[in-house]
Image (spheres, rainbow, N blue to C red):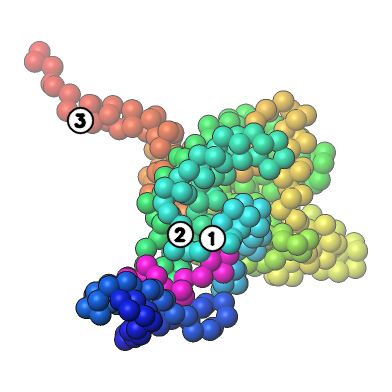
């Protein structure tokens, strides 16, 4: 990289160097300084300028936070989940861009981000002006950090100021989990709402499948002979439309069903087949397990299952219990019975067992106590008599 020195007057010099192209306009950008002193001092200043440009301190190619966020989101959105992309867009539009959009990237400092996070915690509510939950601030930070990280990869920044920032620690919510008798009550009461709901709830509790995965199930995914269920897809709702997509971890998994659950699903299949035949159609391998259509061609909306569950929960007085807690119920019951973490993780479709441990560590106490008792029995000192 070369620069130039031009004398402007006695003991006055202009030092100038190319600093890349503006990311938004593509125009060439230059850094210019006026140095008072000797030519030797101007040469020293030019050398310093070239070093600073190389380090990214003066590069005009950095643009603004808004430039980067828009470019990053346009590239990232096609690879984001249909439910995640709108959330990122909302956080950009409502939180990040109003505060940082016009700020040059080179002026974003870690300390300023930390101050902003503190302000959000104190009075970040958009409507009330009240405190913003730590988990919300953490999500805002995560989006901004991803955008800035991409800026580093593109050369717009030399370092990511969000990488060393200190957003509030996300609080782990205390789970209000149903016990087996609660789940049994929910399943029994569900028949009065929709004849397919008992099977949905039973299968969700038996497999730990996510609600979108449950809605995406088709009859080709059920192997009655081997009592196997393949969980391959997920349904999400975005923009009022249902989208069939990969599972959350982009993995296909197969879980074994117990005999009673298999029988319940088989009875559900026969009922659906009878209904379809009555309406002049038939079930096919690609028909959905859960559908409001007589030919079972369209899946339930995930929100329908949540709404139905919520109404039953309120009727039964199960305060704080959510549909997703059937997934937690499945995991915690298995862990408390001593089933190894890797098996539980596989059934849940977690990317790795560490995720399972992180979420359910608080429920490992009973298994740990049993492990201690087993080892204690093995190491028991023989009775000298």
Q: Is residue 216 above or below residue 331?
A: below
Residue 64 falls within the magenta-colored stretch: yes
Residue 234, percent across and down?
63, 61
Picture quadrant of residue 360: top left
- Counting residues from the start of the chain, the first of labels 3 and 2 encountered is 2
Tell me the distance, in whole angstroms, between the alpha carbons under discs 1 and 3: 66 Å
Tell me the distance, in whole angstroms, between the alpha carbons under discs 2 and 1: 7 Å
Q: Determine the residue positioned at 40% across, 60% down.
A: 160
**For the residue labelled by badge 2, is the local secondary structure a helix, a strand or a loop?**
helix
Report crowding for label 3: few under 14, some 14 to 19, many 20 or more residues within 10 A (C-alpha): few
Residue 333, percent across and down?
49, 37
Q: Is residue 311 left or right of residue 31?
A: right
- Disc on res. 103: 1
Outermost residue toward the front?
A: 10
- Disc on res. 378: 3
Q: Determine the residue positioned at 42% across, 45% down.
A: 166
Q: Is residue 184 above or below residue 49?
A: above
Q: Which residues are magenta?
A: 49-68
């Amino acid at each position: 990289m070369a620069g130039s020195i031009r004398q402007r007057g006695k003991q006055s010099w202009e030092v100038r160097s190319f600093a890349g192209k503006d990311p938004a306009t593509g125009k060439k950008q230059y850094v210019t300084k006026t140095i008072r002193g000797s030519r030797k001092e101007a040469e020293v200043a030019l050398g310093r300028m070239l070093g600073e440009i190389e380090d990214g301190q003066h590069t005009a190619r950095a643009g603004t936070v808004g430039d980067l966020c828009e470019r990053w989101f346009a590239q990232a959105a096609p690879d984001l989940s249909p439910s995640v992309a709108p959330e990122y867009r909302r956080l950009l539009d409502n939180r990040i861009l109003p505060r940082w959009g016009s700020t040059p990237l080179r002026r974003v400092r870690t300390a300023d981000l930390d101050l902003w996070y503190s302000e959000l915690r104190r009075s970040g509510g958009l409507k009330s002006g009240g405190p913003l939950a730590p988990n919300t601030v953490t999500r805002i930070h995560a989006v901004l950090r991803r955008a800035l990280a991409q800026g580093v990869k593109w050369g717009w920044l030399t370092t990511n100021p969000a990488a060393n920032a200190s957003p509030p620690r996300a609080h782990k919510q205390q789970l209000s989990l149903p016990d087996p008798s609660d789940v049994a009550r929910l399943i029994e009461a569900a028949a009065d709402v929709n004849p397919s709901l008992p099977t949905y709830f039973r299968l969700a509790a038996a497999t730990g499948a996510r609600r979108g995965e449950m809605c995406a199930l088709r009859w080709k995914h059920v192997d009655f002979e081997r009592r196997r269920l393949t969980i391959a897809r997920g349904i999400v709702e975005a923009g009022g439309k249902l989208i069939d997509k990969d599972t959350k971890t982009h993995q296909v998994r197969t879980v074994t069903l117990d005999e009673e659950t298999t029988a319940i699903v088989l009875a559900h299949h026969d009922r659906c087949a009878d209904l379809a035949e009555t309406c002049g159609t038939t079930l096919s391998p690609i028909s959905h397990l859960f559908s409001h259509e007589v030919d079972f061609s369209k899946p339930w909306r995930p929100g329908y299952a949540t709404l139905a569950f919520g109404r039953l929960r309120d009727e039964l007085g199960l305060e704080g219990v959510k549909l997703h807690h059937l997934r937690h119920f499945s995991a915690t019951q298995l862990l408390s019975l001593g089933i190894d973490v890797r098996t539980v993780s596989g059934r849940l479709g977690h990317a790795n067992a560490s995720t399972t441990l992180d979420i359910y560590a608080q429920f490992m106490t009973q298994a740990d106590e049993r492990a201690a008792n087993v080892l204690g029995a093995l190491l028991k000192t023989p009775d000298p008599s």
